[in-house]
Image (cartoon, coloured by chain):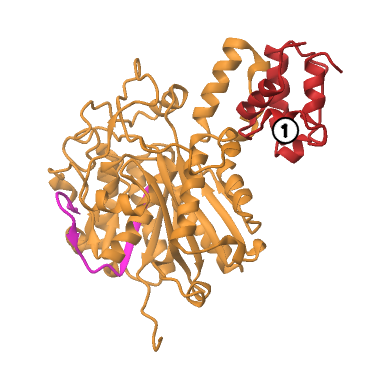
Chain colours: A orange, B red
Amino acid sequence: MSPVVTGLGVIAPSGIGVGDFWPAVRDGHVALGPVSRFEPNPYPVVVTGEVSEFEPEGWIDPRITVQTDRFTHFALAAAGMALRDAELDPRTVPPFEFGVVTASYSGGVEFGQREIERLWKDGPEHVGPYQSIAWFYAACTGQISIGNGLRGPSGVLVADEAGGLDAIAAAAGELRRGAKAMLVGGAEAPFCPYSMCCQLGLGLLSTGEDPTTAYLPFSYRANGFTPAEGGAMLVVEDEEAARARGVDVRAVVAGHCATYTGTQRFDRSAEGLLRAAEGALAEAGVDAADVDVVFLDALADRRADAAEAEAVRRLFGDRADRVPATAPKAGYGRCYSGAAVLDVATAVLAIEHGTVPPTPGVRDCRFDLDLDLVTGAARAADIRTALVLSRGQHGGNSALVLRRPEPIQGGN
Amino acid sequence: MDAHLSPNDLAALISRCTGVTVTGEQVTDSDRTFDDLGVDSLGLMGVLAELQRNHGMSRDVDMQPDQSPLELLNLVSGRA
């Protein structure tokens, strides 16, 4: 039994849907810009990655729109796109064999900001009842499940940013235990003053004012990351079930591993990422020598970048400076638990197109890191195995291995 | 109490609070419950809170989704 990706639904500052997202990412387009979702003064972060084109109308049932936060609007819309992309009508799958797993980091903060303001300005009776269900981490899983009639194994992972990869592993586990299909991913909408204050406490956000230079991971000018909203949902199915219904198998979810090394201990994250990568490759049954591209976590903090590069060097040894590595998120920002899921979606597209998208904006990758960071233009590559790395601010390190599906032998 | 609240006003208030599109005609149909309209218990709670805050409805009023908007209208406008 192999879990395989059959559908992608992406909502990112770079584009809504893979048709817009992939060309923008492939061409290294920078989709960062000035904060517009709240009055940025007096907050020091002035550049973010916003999905400025997205409004819930046309995507979400109006009665669900009023009950839910923007992060759930993203997740519902992305789930719908993923199902269409996979050509999968959920009504054709037995409901108890189709589940949903999402990762969450911020929860429904924009909705919560509004209700907290009502509480303090006008009193408790002015807080709307939907606050009870809109804020919480499981809102996306719950609404996707209800909206699509999915009654299979479901859950939500609040496991820092790396939870995006852990959610995909959880979905793969459910397929091994008998589920036929899973919707899996994560989305974030972390732009309101209350949420921004929480993020500022991390001490890792870029205060750069120029969107083209605010987020430059692995460069000499790296000075923090740019936060983003958005995320992705994937349809992951049992390979046999996918082949039986005649759809394209896009990539195999081959291996995963997670480690924990403590809050903001980036010196230790080198060991943590290395062990996660080794564990994921072992589960996939491949060697480090088989890896054709690495999607980097890319915190754009000097110590964190150095630790990640160290993990890559120790994983690949002498080959480290010849394995293409990239951080496309430098072009659209870091959307917390959605970031790694977008990287997985990008990795699937990279495998399909035989193309490694660049790390936008970066022209001066640090020499001491010994990375083959793809910058400038996309690079053609025959990708059979992709490694995705993700790290949380609070010590989670995860790795996921995706493999190109083998052509069907003797098929017609 | 708000004797001036019309069926159309209540319909607009329900739509705003719950996202469910409701017409004045549906509000005056005694056979149509909140359940029938697709307004769930949380949505109804939001509607009642809005009427209590801004339309002078008593805080003692409680309603269930199997009751009708017409019953609510009569309560608010003092016709009950």
In the rendered structure, which segment of residues is drawn in magenta? A370-392
Q: Is residue A330 something that shows in the picture?
A: yes
A346 horizontally vs A113: left or right: left
Q: Quadrant of residue B51?
A: top right
Q: Position of residue B47 (x, y in %)?
A: 70, 24
Residue found at x 59% / y 42%: A138
Identify the residue under disc 1.
B26
Residue found at x 66% / y 20%: B9
Residue found at x 35% / y 35%: A50
Question: Does A371 appear in magenta?
Answer: yes
Residue lying furthest bottom in this view? A410
The numbered mark 1 sits on a residue in which chain? Answer: B
A107 horizontally vs A49: left or right: right
Q: Report crowding for label 1: few under 14, some 14 to 19, many 20 or more residues within 10 A (C-alpha).
A: some
Q: Position of residue B13 (x, y in %)?
A: 65, 23
Element under label 1?
helix
Which is more toward the observer, A157 or A233? Answer: A233
Q: How many marks?
A: 1
Q: Position of residue A266 (x, y in %)?
A: 34, 41
Q: Quadrant of residue A188?
A: top left
- The three-letter code of the residue at mark 1 reads Gln
Residue lying furthest front in this view? B25
Which is more toward the observer, A43 or A65? Answer: A65
B9 horizontally vs A278: left or right: right
Q: State whether residue A197 is above or below residue A10.
A: above
Question: Does B22 appear in magenta?
Answer: no
